[in-house]
């Protein structure tokens, strides 16, 4: 029985080794000031969505945006809360 699984020519161990640094610390979620405002691009990166999806979630009330000047910003803490699983 073969214990290796290949994904496009990559073994499970090679895949695990490749993603281990990503799983050890997500610097996006570990910023020092969770109440700071972030841009739409940063919010999309944290949520792993595109700007259209971000706009839809904002318009539906799932996310709250803040207009400051001519910029649309989000609070980092609210974005992080949106990705946390419900307890």
Image (tube, rainbow, N blue to C red):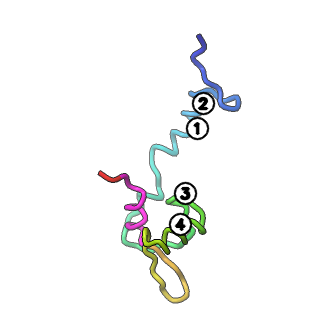
Residues in magenta, as a range: 75-85
- Image check: 19 left or right of 82? right
Q: Residue at x 59, y 68 (%)?
A: 51
Q: CA distance from mark 3 to mark 4?
A: 10 Å
Q: Residues within 10 Å of mark 1 (few under 14, many from 20)?
A: few
Give the labeled residue for mark 4: 42
**Badge 4 element:** helix
Q: Nearer the viewer, mark 1 or mark 3?
A: 3
The answer to whether mark 2 and mark 1 are in CB contact below 8 A is yes
Residue at position x 49%, y 77% in the image: 73
Left or right: 11 as drawn, with respect to 80? right
**Mark closest to the chain's N terminus, 1 or 3:** 1
- Residue 64 on image: x %, y %: 43, 74
Asked whether 81 or 11 is in front, the reply is 81
Question: Quarter holding the N terminus?
Answer: top right
Q: At 42% across and 72% down in the image, what residue appears?
A: 75
Q: Nearer the viewer, mark 3 or mark 2?
A: 3
State whether the magenta stretch is mostly helix, strand or loop: helix
Q: Quadrant of residue 41?
A: bottom right
Q: Element type at marker 2?
A: helix
Q: Nearer the viewer, mark 3 or mark 4?
A: 3
Q: Quick check: marks 2 and 4 in contact, CB under 8 Å?
A: no
Query: Of the numbered discs in the image, which one, if any, rests on residue 14?
Result: 2
Could you say whether the residue bearing mark 1 is in a helix, strand or loop?
helix
Q: Does 79 appear above or below 7?
A: below
3D distance between C-alphas at marks 3 and 2: 24 Å
Tell me, yes or no, whether the highlighted magenta stretch contains residue 12. Answer: no
Residue that label 1 marks: 18
């Amino acid at each position: 029985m073969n214990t290796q699984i290949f994904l496009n020519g990559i073994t499970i161990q090679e895949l695990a080794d490749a993603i281990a640094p990503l799983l050890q610390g997500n610097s996006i979620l570990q910023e020092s000031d969770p109440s700071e405002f972030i841009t739409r691009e940063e919010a999309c990166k944290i949520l792993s969505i595109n700007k259209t999806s971000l706009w839809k979630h904002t318009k539906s009330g799932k996310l709250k945006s803040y207009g400051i000047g001519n910029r649309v910003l989000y609070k980092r803490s609210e974005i992080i809360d949106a990705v946390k699983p419900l307890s």
